Image: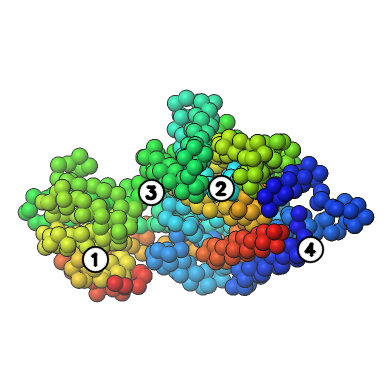
Amino acid sequence: MFGERTRNLHVVGTVLMAGSLILGLTACGGSSSDSVKVGLITKTDSNPYFVKLREAAQAQADKDGAKLIALAGAFDGDNEGQVAAIENMVGQGVKGILITPNSSTGVLDAIKKARDAGVVVIALDTATDPENAVDATFATDNKAAGVSQGKWVKAALGNAAPQVVMLDGTPGGTVDTFRHDGFLEGFGITNDSPEIVGRENTNGDQTKAQTAMENILQRAPGINALYTINEPAAAGAYQAIQSANRAAQITIGSIDGSCTGIADVKSGQIGATVLQFPAKMAEQGVQAVVKFAKDGTKPSGFNDTGSQLVTDKPVPGLESQDTAWGEKNCWGTASK
Amino acid sequence: MGRKELLGHSQQMTTGAPATATPSVSSRFNVGSILREPLLGPLVALVIAIIIFSAVSDSFLNPQNVSLILQQSVVVGILAVGQTLIILTSGIDLSIGAVAVFGTIVMAQSAGANGPVVALGSTLLVCVVFGAVNGGLVTTLRLPPFIVTLGTFTAIQAATRLLAGSETYRVEKGPLTFLGTSFRIGSFSTTFGVVAMLLVYLVMWYALSQTSWGKHIYAVGGNPQASNLSGIKSGRVLFSVYVTTGVIAAIAAWAALGRIPNADPNAYQNANLETITAVVIGGTSLFGGRGGVGGTLVGTLIVGVLRNGLTQAGVDNLYQNIATGILVIVAVAVDQFARRRSQ
C-alpha cells in the first residue's frame, strides 16, 4: 500500500515528531538534586493571585534550599488536571504538596493516595470539604473576611433601608460559601431576608458579573448595596452600574486585595475591600513541608493567614487601613 | 482511484500483507515490508519519546510512573477508539467527550436511588441514544458530521450543566468505581480501567480487521460512491458506527468514575480534541479509509508519554500544548503527503 517514497516520508515524519519533543524540552534542565522537593498545584497559571502564590513559594523554597515543582490546572474548575498533577508529583518523590483545589470534593481521593504514600498535603487558600482531608490548611479565614465586608457595607449605608444584591462565585468551592455566609453575618441578615433583592453566580469572572449586574438592574432598580465575591466581579458589576448611571447610589464591597482592586478602591469604584495575604500562605506552606522533611512534624489544623479591611471611607467601630497601606501590601500588578 | 483503490483496500484486509506483484521481489518478512507498515512512524516516535524522557528524568521508567501514564490515558484512550471508527468513515465526532461526561452525571445521580445495575444501564441507554442522534442526523439528513457533532456537543454540554445543577456528585466505592480498582501483576500495579481500555482496543481491532462490518467501514470511508455501487449500505454502516461510539462513550464514563469517583460537569472539556489528536498522531487519515485502532493506541500512548514526561521535566502546561499541537500538524502533513503520493 505504501511505496518507497511514503516510507521515507514516515521516517521524515517521525524525525520531525521527535524534533518537536526536543523543542518542548529545550527550556528545562531536569537534573535531580538531593534537596527537598515541594510541590505546588494552583487552580490555574494565569490568575495573578496564583502567580503571586507561586512567586512567594519559589522565594521561600530558594531561601530554605528546597526545590519547588509548580503545576496548575488548565482552567478554573479543572479537577482532572490537578489530580494528574498530584499523581505526577508523588511519582517524582515530593515530600509535600501545597494545593489550591479547584474542586473541594473531587480531589479527595488523589489527596488520600498521596498521604498514604507518606506525602504531607496542605491546602492553600481554599479548604477541602471536609477540611481534615488534608494535613493542614493555610488560608484566609474567608468567613471573617466576609464578615468585615458585611459590617462595612451595612455601616456605610447609614440609615437607608438596605436593598442588597449578592454576586457569588462558583458553587462547590468553600471560599464561595464562607465569604457569602460571612457577609450575611456581618450585615445582620440571612439568605431568606427580604433585604436581598438579587443573587447571581459569576464564577468570579468580570464579564459574567457585568452581564449578571445588567440583568439584575433591570428587575431591581432600587438596590443600594452590593456584595461581590472578588474584585474582578466588582469591576464587572461597576461597568454595568456606571452604564445605568447608578454609581452614586450603590455601595460596593469586595474581597481579595489585588493591586487592581486596591486601585479601584482608591478611585472610588469599590467602597471597601478585604485584603488577603497569599504570600503568607505560600511561605508558611513551604516552611511546613521543609520542617516535615527535616524532623517529621506535620502541620495541622486551620491556620488563618489573616485578612485586612481596606477603605478610604472608614466607619466608626470597624478597624481598617487606607489605600496607601493597601498599595504597599497588595498582590499582582495594577492594570486598567 | 475509484474501484481499484477500494478493491486494493479489501485485498489488504484479507491477506494481511502488502500486495506484491511478483513473488520473487520480496518475501513476507523482509525489511521492506516492515518499513512499509503504517504503524512504524508512530511507534518510532513513541520509542524516541520514551528514550528522551527517561534520559531527562530518572523516575520516568519506574513501574509506578509507567502505570500512571497508562491510568492517565484510560478515559481519552477509550474514547479515541470511537473517534477512530468515525474518522475512518471520513467523519469526525466533536461530541464524544460531552456524551461521556453526561453519562457520568447520569450514572452518579441514578446510583444513589437505584443501585449500580440500573445506573450502568441508564448510562448505556443515554449514550447510545446520543450516538443514534448523531448517526441519524448524519445519515438521514446527510449533514456533515463536523456540523452535526458540533451542534450536539454544544447542546449536550449545556444539558449536562442543567442536569447536574452546577454541582458535582460523589460516587461511593463499589461496582461503579470498579474500573478504578487496582491490582498487581507481580510487582506492577495497574487498574481494571487499563484492562478495560486494552480490551476495547482488542475487540475493535478484531472487528475492524476480521469482520465484514469492519471492511465496510473502511470501504465507506475510503470511497462512499464505490462502496454504494458494490452493494454496501453506507447509511446503515455509518449509523452503526455512531451507535457503537455511543457504547464506547458509556464505557469511558464508567472508567472516568473509576479514576475520579466524582461526576463533574466541568470534566473532560477537551477530550474531543484530545481523541482527535491521538487518532491523527497514530496515523489514521482524517480523510477516511486508512488507519486503525492500533495506530490510535500508539497515538494515545504518545500523548500520555508526552504529557507525563514534560510534566516531570518541569515544562509548563502551555508549552505541553504547543508541543502536542506541533505533533498533530506534523502527523496530518505526513498523512497528506502519503495520500498524494499514493495516487
Mark 1 highlights which residue?
A: A310
Mark 3 highlights which residue?
A: A173
Of circles 1 and 4, the one toward us is 4
Letter of the chain that mark 4 sits on in the rendering: A
Letter of the chain that mark 1 sits on in the rendering: A
Residues at marks 3 and 2, CA–CA distance in whole angstroms: 39 Å
Image quadrant containing the C terminus of chain A: bottom left
> Residue B248: percent from the left, percent from the top?
58, 38
> Residue B90: percent from the left, percent from the top?
59, 49
Residue drawn at 22 percent across, 62 percent down: A239
Give above or below for B175 relative to A43.
Answer: above
The numbered mark at residue A4 is 4
Q: Is residue A55 visible?
A: yes
Residues at marks 4 and 2, CA–CA distance in whole angstroms: 29 Å
Relative to residue B76, is residue B36 drawn left or right? right
Whether the residues at callouts 3 and 4 have beta carbons within 8 Å, the answer is: no
Give above or below for A28 relative to B18.
Answer: below
